[in-house]
Image (tube, rainbow, N blue to C red):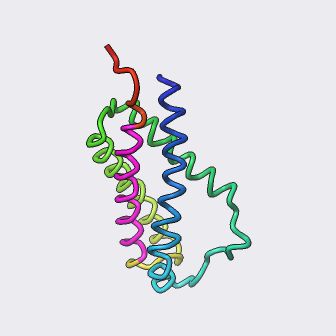
Amino acid sequence: MDFKKLGIGGIVGGILFFGFGYLIYGMLLMDFMAKNPGVAGNVNRAEADMQFLYLAAGNLLSGFMMAYIFIRANVKTAVDGLITGGIVGFLLMASMDCVMYGTTTVMSKKMMAADVAAGTAMSAIIGAIVAMVMNMGKKEA
């Protein structure tokens, strides 16, 4: 296992997940998600009550998961990262959202569909960038 690539890819991926998450969910989809909640209604924490340590940890763990998968799958190019990141993102988002929709009243079907689409796109874009960053520098012989 190339721990240097894992560390670099994980940290870069975590930062990207945090930034893109804010952009996509905190800005672009914020109103849509607020207008399409599940029966439970607004379950979001107030901005002053957000737990940023856990938010940062979750994003960092997502970055390390992606970097680990890329190392194991031998992802070497941005295109491979885009495809692999998109597939992994879709499978994770769809599986978690289906379970959440099936067991709670937190999200509506519209919210679930938007979340899966946004998470897939975000993971694909981040996957391309992480693949490029992980494979910069000296080429293997």
Q: Is residue 129 left or right of residue 50?
A: left
Residue at x 44% of width, y 65% of height: 97
Residue 85 x %, y %:
35, 47
Residue at x 26% of width, y 43% of height: 79
In this rendered view, identify the residue nearer to me: 65 or 128. Answer: 128
Q: Does the magenta segment cover residue 96? A: no
Please tell me in which quadrant of the rendered image residue 76 appears. Answer: top left
In the image, the segment drawn in magenta is: 111-132
Q: Quadrant of the C terminus?
A: top left
Which residue, as the protein is rendered here, is positioned at the far front?
Answer: 137
In this rendered view, identify the residue nearer to me: 118 or 16. Answer: 16
Residue 134 x %, y %:
42, 33
Q: Is residue 126 left or right of residue 44?
A: left
Tally of numbered tags: 0
Q: Is residue 106 left or right of residue 72?
A: right
Q: Does the magenta segment cover residue 127? A: yes
- Secondary structure predominantly adopted by residues drawn in magenta: helix
Residue 17 x %, y %:
50, 53
Q: Can you say whether 52 is above or below 40 in the image?
A: above
In this rendered view, identify the residue nearer to me: 62 or 140. Answer: 140
Residue 127 x %, y %:
38, 46
Q: Can you say whether 91 is above or below 78 in the image?
A: below
Q: Can you say whether 100 is above or below 71 in the image?
A: below
Which residue, as the protein is rendered here, is positioned at the far top?
Answer: 141
Residue at x 42% of width, y 37% of height: 133
